[in-house]
Image (cartoon, rainbow, N blue to C red):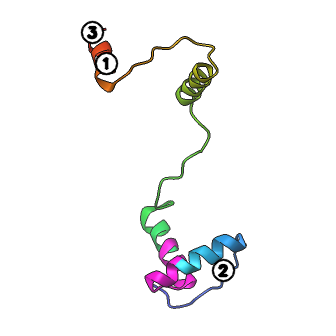
Amino acid sequence: MSSITSSLNVNVNAETKKEASKVLDELGLNMTTAINIYLKQIVKHNGIPFEVKNRVPNHKLKKALKETDKIIKGKVNSKAYSSAEDLMKDILDN
C-alpha cells in the first residue's frame, strides 16, 4: 500500500462531531484514525461496512401502524385480556 497521504475535508454536524470525538477519545482513537479505519473497511467490504436502512416503514408495518391507531382511537373493536394466560388460551383455542 502506498504511503502517500491525501487530505479529506468533510462537512459534518458540529454536535455529531463533538459526540463522535468524545467516543473516539474514550477508545483511544482520534478522528483521523477512525476515518481511515472506516475507509479501509469500505475497500475491504467493497461497500459500506454496515447495513444502511431506510427509516421509512415498509407496507406491512404501515398497515399495522394504521390498525393500531384505529384501535387506540376506538374505531375498531378489539379484545381485551385480563392476563397473559387468557390471551394465550384464546390464541391456542382459535
Q: Residue at x 68, y 72 (%)?
A: 15
Q: Which mark is residue 86?
A: 1
Q: Amino acid at mark 2?
A: Leu
Residue plotted at (65% across, 85% down): 7
Q: In the image, what residue occupies the spot 45% across and 86% down? A: 28
Front position in the image: 92 or 34 = 92
Q: Secondary structure at mark 1?
A: helix
Task: Specify the label residue 8 is tagged with.
Answer: 2
Badge 3 marks a residue whose secondary structure is helix
Percent of width and height locating residue 8: 66, 80
Q: Are marks 3 and 1 in contact (CB under 8 Å)?
A: no
* Image quadrant assignment for residue 12: bottom right
Query: SS at mark 2?
Result: loop
| Foreground tag (2 vs 3) | 3
Crowdedness of circle 3 by 10 Å Cα count: few (<14), some, many (20+)?
A: few
Is 12 placed left or right of 27 in the picture?
right
Q: Amino acid at mark 3?
A: Asp
The Cα–Cα distance between marks 3 and 1, rounded to whole angstroms, is: 10 Å
Highlighted magenta segment, given as a residue range: 23-38
Find residue 24 and report its horizontal and vertical position in percent: 51, 80
- The disc, 3 or 1, on the residue closer to the chain's N-terminal end is 1
Residue 59 seen in the current view? yes
- Mark 1 and mark 2 in contact (Cβ < 8 Å)? no
- In the image shown, does 28 or 49 lie closer to the viewer? 28
Give residue 76's quadrant in the image: top right
